Amino acid sequence: MPDTETANLVIATVRDFVDREVRPVAAAHDHDDTYPEALIDRMKELGLFGLTIPEQFGGAGASPTLYANVIEELALGWMSLTGALNTHLLLALMIQESGTDEQRERLLPLMADGTLRGVLCITEPGAGTDVQAIQARAVDDGDHYLLTGSKMFITNGRHGDLYGVVCKTDPDAEPAYKGISLILAQKGPGLTVVRDIPKMGYRGIETTELSFDGLRVPKTDLLGGVEGQGFRHVMRGLELGRVNVAARAVGVARAALQDSIRYAQQRQTFGKPIAEHQAIQELLADMATDVQASHLLVVNAAAKMERGERADLEAGMAKLFASEACLRVATSAMRIHGGVGYTQDLPIERYFRDAPLMIIGEGTSEIQRQVIARRLISQYPDGDLLRDSL
Ligand SMILES: Cc1cc2nc3c(=O)[nH]c(=O)nc-3n(C[C@H](O)[C@H](O)[C@H](O)COP(=O)(O)OP(=O)(O)OC[C@H]3O[C@@H](n4cnc5c(N)ncnc54)[C@H](O)[C@@H]3O)c2cc1C
């Protein structure tokens, strides 16, 4: 794991990349909804696709905290770029923790340098929050599986290479989660990208509908080599995914706050900068408090993961608070900028369109509340949530 000095260097490098290479082109990619091929190539060169993959497999072995910091910095420039890393590193974590030795040695080095880009296929037209309702099947065909089914909202579905397909190996299992497996598929006859789904925000990085129609996958590509473990893999991986989405929310909110503070000091009404009007000061104060609190919740969740402890409560809180805060902050930035905030001349309207994704992806706010409440009651039946932190 990198020491503090190395971690600071990584953050400074990402900041420099964002300032010099991302900011100048983000608006054009967003408005035209064009795939940022050159930026993705640079992210590979910078080693970002191997950020959390252990050094023994060619990655940087970054801690969840460093990972969250990097995601925040990228989202500060353009949130979409963080989506290229999220399911990739989430899938890599699942392979690292649950894969067979052969899967780890074969796949992780190729993922670390971005040769194989990871995709996570959970959602279907009829199953999002309710993962156990998925219909995709892996049918036994000797030493292969045949994958069939539709997957919906799959980020990186066109440019990705390694698809973690959550599907049923035993559709009759009771409870249903015991029949779910995760299969590591690659492109071939039987996998079709049906379409890129048009989106209000989070543009440039594709979100796709996929069709599996008899894609043959060797049984050696069943994650971990044991059927029925897919639901467990997904739930564990989602902890890191929720830290990613929460950190993205902090990055977007930070950008909206920075732009608003700058603008409020320049824009004059009634003979003084709008920053001197109490109503604007109240907005700025609430925005800054939201940003700071969100950041601290993300750091808290990442630190818990770093200690190797179960962090679904903390990751759920970070994701819930930071995503809802980001929506508030983006809306306040729009208010502060007045008419110009509504135009495509400034990135304020982009923050406003990007922010709602964070309350949906990696589990909606409603589901985070359920995760938090369930865990709270089982882990802290006396309600003394902070006893371990003091
Ligand atoms: C841009 C984008 C990218 C995405 N990328 C991926 C990806 O790469 N891979 C992938 O697998 N998925 C991806 N998703 C899917 C995403 O994870 C789902 O959209 C999300 O989990 C919600 O599922 P759903 O859309 O089916 O909503 P539904 O499950 O239909 O929920 C609809 C509403 O009902 C609420 N609800 C549902 N169940 C309950 C309950 N028990 N109690 C209270 N309220 C409830 C929800 O909170 C929500 O408000 C992506 C989505 C988007 C928009």
Image (cartoon, rainbow, N blue to C red):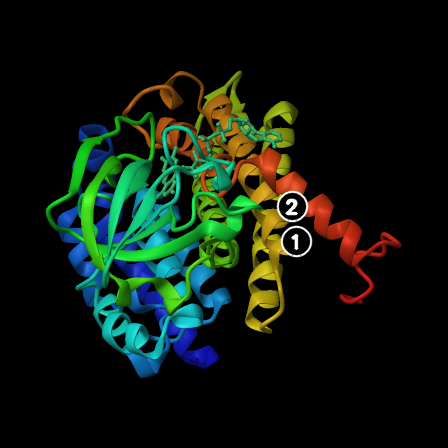
* Mark 2 residue type: Val
Left or right, 160 with respect to 137, comes to left
Q: Which residue of the protein is positioned furthest toward the right in this rendering?
A: 382
Q: Where 381 sits versus 330, above or below?
A: below
The x, y position of residue 175, in whole percent, is: 57, 46
Whole-Å distance between the Cαs marked 1 and 2? 7 Å
- For the question of whether residue 66 can be seen, the reply is yes
Left or right, 87 with respect to 274, comes to left
Q: Quadrant of the N terminus?
A: bottom left
Q: Where 365 sits versus 13, above or below?
A: above
- For the question of whether residue 247 can be seen, the reply is no
In front: mark 1 or mark 2?
A: 2
The x, y position of residue 74, in whole percent, is: 35, 52
192 or 228, which is in the foreground?
Answer: 228
- The residue tagged 2 is 371
- The residue tagged 1 is 313
Determine whether the residue tagged by mark 2 lies in a helix, strand or loop: helix
Q: Is there a contact, CB below 8 Å, between mark 1 and mark 2?
A: yes
Q: Determine the residue positioned at 52% across, 54% down.
A: 235
The total number of labels drawn is 2
Q: Where 225 sits versus 344, above or below?
A: below
Left or right, 33 with respect to 108, comes to left
The x, y position of residue 166, in whole percent, is: 38, 49
Judge the density around disc 2: few (<14), some (14-19), many (≥20) Cα neighbours within 10 Å. some
Q: Which residue of the protein is positioned furthest toward the front in this rendering?
A: 142
Determine whether the residue tagged by mark 1 lies in a helix, strand or loop: helix
Judge the density around disc 1: few (<14), some (14-19), many (≥20) Cα neighbours within 10 Å. many
